[in-house]
Amino acid sequence: MRCPFCLHLDSKVLDSRQTEEGASIRRRRECMACHKRFTTYERLDEVPFMVIKKDGRREPFTRTKILNGILRACEKRPISLQTIDSLVDEIERDVRSGLDREISSEAIGELVMDKLRMLDEVAYVRFASVYRQFTDIERFMEELEQMRKADN
């Protein structure tokens, strides 16, 4: 395993644990060159799951895209990385639990927004503003009104 700090190829495993869901193994490692510690995750390599984009293209599902979008939405919010990682795990599990091997990007976006709405309203609004491509303040205000009505 390549060290993310010095790029040395040799590391030793200090601790191995199964994640709560049992879908992956978390390994705590130490680089043999710089002695810094880092964490890796091993996941089962599954049959590719395809995402149908808005323009009709198909591409493999990548957890990283969801993680990056949520990280941007949660920037400077009091949400731990562990909570975000658990949220992404939950979304990935929901996506993969469907019977079909394909899902639309819209369905994934809606799922992410539902989860973010329950976690943090500010993060939800940030994500929704990019996902729904608000073009003016009126669309933005409509979304806020819908949130307000849903909470009452």
Image: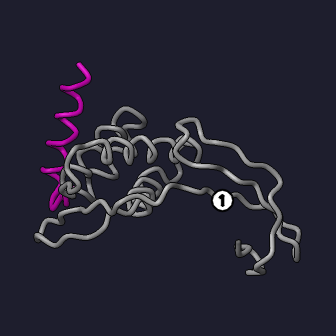
Q: Quadrant of residue 133?
A: bottom left
Kindly identify the residue that appears in the image at 79 percent across and 49 percent down. 15
Q: Residue furthest top?
A: 152
- Colour scheme of the rendered structure: one colour
Residue 1 falls left or right of residue 100: right
Q: Residues within 10 Å of mark 1 (few under 14, many from 20)?
A: few
Q: Quadrant of residue 40?
A: bottom right
State the residue in front, 81 or 16: 16
- Does residue 105 sit above or below 18 in this rendering? below
Residue 127: percent from left, percent from top: 32, 52
Circle 1 is placed at which residue position? 40
Residue 76: percent from left, percent from top: 53, 51
* Amino acid type indicated by mark 1: Thr
Kindly identify the residue that appears in the image at 51 percent across and 42 percent down. 86
Kindly identify the residue that appears in the image at 15 percent across and 62 percent down. 135
State the residue in front, 95 or 73: 95
Q: Is residue 139 magenta?
A: yes
Q: Is residue 78 magenta?
A: no
Q: Secondary structure at mark 1?
A: strand
- Does residue 31 sit above or below 92 in this rendering? below
Residue 112 visible in image:
no
Tell me the magenta residue range. 132-152
- Name the quadrant of the N terminus: bottom right
Tell me the chief SS of the magenta region: helix
- Does residue 129 sit above or below 125 in this rendering? below
Kindly identify the residue that appears in the image at 47 percent across and 55 percent down. 71
Q: Quadrant of residue 22?
A: top right
